[in-house]
Image (cartoon, helix red, strand yellow):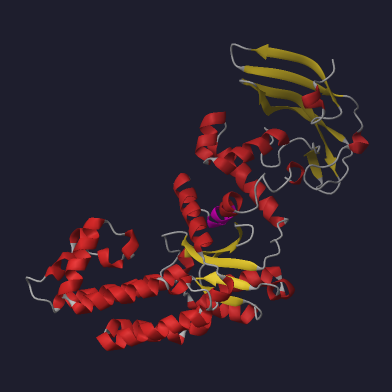
C-alpha cells in the first residue's frame, strides 16, 4: 500500500503495511516498513559514520502532525549496527526524526516550536498533551541551533536600553548591573537584534565586537538614555556614530527639578494660601501637565494659584517653554529659546532649576544631536514592555540563556516568520 502524499514527502524509502483508525480513542496508527535494507547507506545517528555489522533493530513510535482532531502515530523498525568510529552499536540516522526527542517527527517538532513562539510552553503542553519538559527541551534546543547560524543584520540606526532580567544575585559580591539585560534594537526594522546580560560597558562592547569594526563604522545614530557606560562604549567602538539622548528622559529630569521647586514654594507659602491646592491629592502634579491638556476645572485652579503667587506663575511659563524646546526645527532655534529660559530661571532665583540647567547645557554637545536625527529610544521602551510581558507569560525564567533567546524569538528574528522551515 502506498503512503499518503503528506507522509511520503516527509518519510522517504518507507512504505505502508497497515493503517488503523481509532475514532473512539482519537488517534490513527500507521505502520511502515523500509523498502530496501541496504546497510551501506546507513549512517550513525551520533557521528555520521557509515555503519557495518547488524546488531538488531528496535521498534519506534513517532507522533506526527494531527489530522483534524485525530492524533497520528507512526510505527517503524529502526536498525542498529556497529559504528567503527564510536566502537559500539548505534542506531541509524533518520532525517525525519526530531533532534530533541526520538518520539516526534521533525515536521511536528517544527509546528510545536511555532506554537511556543506565541504562547507559554505550559499552555502548549495543555493543548497538545505533550510533556512540559519535552516541549521546553524542544524549544530551547531549536533556539540554540538557530542562534549558531544567526547573523546580526546590517544596522545604521540603533536604540539601546536596559531591561530588568532577574532579581536573584548569583553571589554576594555581584554588581546590580548584572541583573539587567542590554537590549539593542534596529530603528529601521523595529526589531531586537541582540541581547546581552548586564548593563555595563562590556555588555555593549560585546555587540560591537560581534558585528565587527567595519559594520560598526557604518552605524550613524545610537539612541539611548543618559547611561554613561553606553555612551563610553559607543564613543570607543563607533567613531562615526552620534549619540542621541532620549528626549523623554531629559524632560523627566526637568520635571524632577520642577517638582523640587514646587515643594520649596509650598514650604515658604502661608498656611491659608491657595497654593496649597497643588501640594497634594489630585492637583499635586497638575502644574506639570501641558496647559492645553488640562480640563476647565484644572485650569481654574492653576489660574487661581498663579494670580496669588508670581513665582508659581513664572514656574508655569518656564515649564511651557521647556516642553516646546524639542519641537523647534533647528538647533539654533532651540538655543535661542534656551537663552530666554535661562534668563527667567536666574530672574526668579530657582536654585534647583539652575543646577538642572547647568547640567543640561554642559551636555549640549550630545543633546543637540536630537535636532539632527529626530530619533528617540521609545522603540526600546516599547520592546521592554513586550519583554516584561514575555517574562510574566512564562512566570519567570531560571535559565538566563533561554530567556535571552526567547527575547530574540518573540521580539527579534529567531522565529518562523523570518527563518524558513528548512533551516530549523
Find out whether residue 404 is within the magenta segment. yes
Which of the pair 98/298 is nearer the observer? 298
Which of the pair 146/342 is nearer the observer? 342
In screen coordinates, is 375 left or right of 305?
right
Q: Residue furthest left?
A: 272
The N terminus - image quarter: top right
- Where is residue 48 drawn, in percent x and y? 83, 46
Find out whether residue 16 is within the magenta segment. no
Residue under the point 62% across and 12% down: 23
Indicate the quadrant where residue 279 lies: bottom left
Question: Where 35 sits versus 41, above or below?
Answer: above
Indicate the quadrant where residue 260 lies: bottom left
What are the residue bounds of the magenta stretch? Answer: 400-405
Q: Is residue 129 visible?
A: no
Question: Where 35 sits versus 23, above or below?
Answer: below
Residue under the point 37% across and 75% down: 321
Residue under the point 61% across and 72% down: 221
Mostly what secondary structure, the magenta segment? helix
In screen coordinates, is 199 left or right of 87?
left
- Where is residue 388 drawn, in percent x and y? 46, 53
Q: Is residue 96 visible?
A: yes
In screen coordinates, is 403 left or right of 62?
left
Residue under the point 81% across and 19% down: 16
- Where is residue 212 drawn, in percent x and y? 71, 72
The C terminus - image quarter: top right
Q: Residue furthest top?
A: 24
Question: Where 405 sits versus 219, above or below?
Answer: above
Amino acid at each position: 500500500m502506498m503512503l499518503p502524499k503528506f507522509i511520503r514527502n516527509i518519510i522517504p524509502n518507507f512504505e505502508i503495511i497497515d493503517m488503523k483508525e481509532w475514532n473512539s480513542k482519537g488517534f490513527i496508527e500507521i505502520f511502515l516498513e523500509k523498502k530496501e535494507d541496504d546497510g551501506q547507506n546507513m549512517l550513525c545517528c551520533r557521528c555520521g559514520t557509515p555503519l557495518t555489522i547488524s546488531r538488531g533493530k528496535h521498534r519506534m513510535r513517532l507522533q506526527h502532525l494531527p489530522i483534524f482532531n485525530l492524533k497520528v502515530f507512526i510505527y517503524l523498525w529502526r536498525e542498529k549496527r556497529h559504528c567503527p568510529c564510536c566502537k559500539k552499536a548505534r542506531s541509524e540516522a533518520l532525517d525525519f526524526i526530531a533532534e530533541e526527542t526520538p518520539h516526534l517527527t521533525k515536521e511536528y517538532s517544527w509546528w510545536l516550536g511555532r506554537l511556543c513562539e506565541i504562547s507559554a510552553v505550559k499552555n502548549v503542553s495543555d493543548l497538545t498533551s505533550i510533556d512540559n519538559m519535552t516541549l521546553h527541551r524542544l524549544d530551547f534546543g531549536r533556539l540554540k541551533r538557530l542562534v549558531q547560524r544567526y547573523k546580526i543584520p546590517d544596522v545604521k540606526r540603533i536604540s539601546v536600553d536596559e531591561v530588568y532580567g532577574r532579581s536573584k544575585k548569583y553571589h554576594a559580591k555581584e554588581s546590580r548591573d548584572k541583573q539587567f539585560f542590554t537590549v539593542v534594537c534596529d530603528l529601521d526594522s523595529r526589531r531586537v537584534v541582540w541581547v546581552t546580560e548586564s548593563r555595563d560597558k562590556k555588555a555593549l562592547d560585546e555587540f560591537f565586537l560581534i558585528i565587527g569594526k567595519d559594520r560598526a563604522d557604518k552605524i550613524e545614530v545610537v539612541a539611548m538614555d543618559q547611561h554613561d557606560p553606553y555612551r563610553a562604549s559607543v564613543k570607543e567602538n563607533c567613531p562615526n556614530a552620534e549619540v542621541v539622548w532620549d528626549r523623554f528622559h531629559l524632560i523627566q529630569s526637568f520635571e524632577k527639578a520642577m517638582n523640587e521647586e514646587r515643594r520649596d514654594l509650598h514650604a515658604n507659602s502661608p498656611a491659608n494660601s491657595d497654593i496649597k491646592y497643588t501640594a497634594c491629592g489630585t492637583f499635586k502634579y497638575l502644574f506639570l501637565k501641558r496647559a492645553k491638556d488640562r480640563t476647565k476645572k484644572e485650569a481654574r485652579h492653576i489660574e487661581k494659584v498663579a494670580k496669588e503667587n508670581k513665582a508659581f506663575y513664572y514656574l508655569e511659563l518656564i515649564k511651557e517653554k521647556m516642553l516646546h524646546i524639542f519641537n523647534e526645527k533647528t538647533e539654533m532655534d532651540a538655543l535661542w529659546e534656551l537663552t530666554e529660559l535661562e534668563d527667567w530661571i536666574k530672574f526668579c532665583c530657582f536654585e534647583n532649576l539652575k543646577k538642572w540647567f547647568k547640567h543640561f547645557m554642559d551636555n549640549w554637545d550630545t543633546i543637540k544631536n536630537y535636532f539632527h536625527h529626530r530619533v528617540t529610544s521609545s522603540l526600546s521602551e516599547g520592546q521592554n514592555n513586550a519583554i516584561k510581558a514575555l517574562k510574566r507569560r512564562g512566570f519567570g525564567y531560571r535559565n538566563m540563556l533561554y530567556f535571552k533567546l526567547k527575547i530574540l524569538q518573540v521580539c527579534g528574528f529567531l522565529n518562523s516568520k523570518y527563518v524558513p522551515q528548512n533551516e530549523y
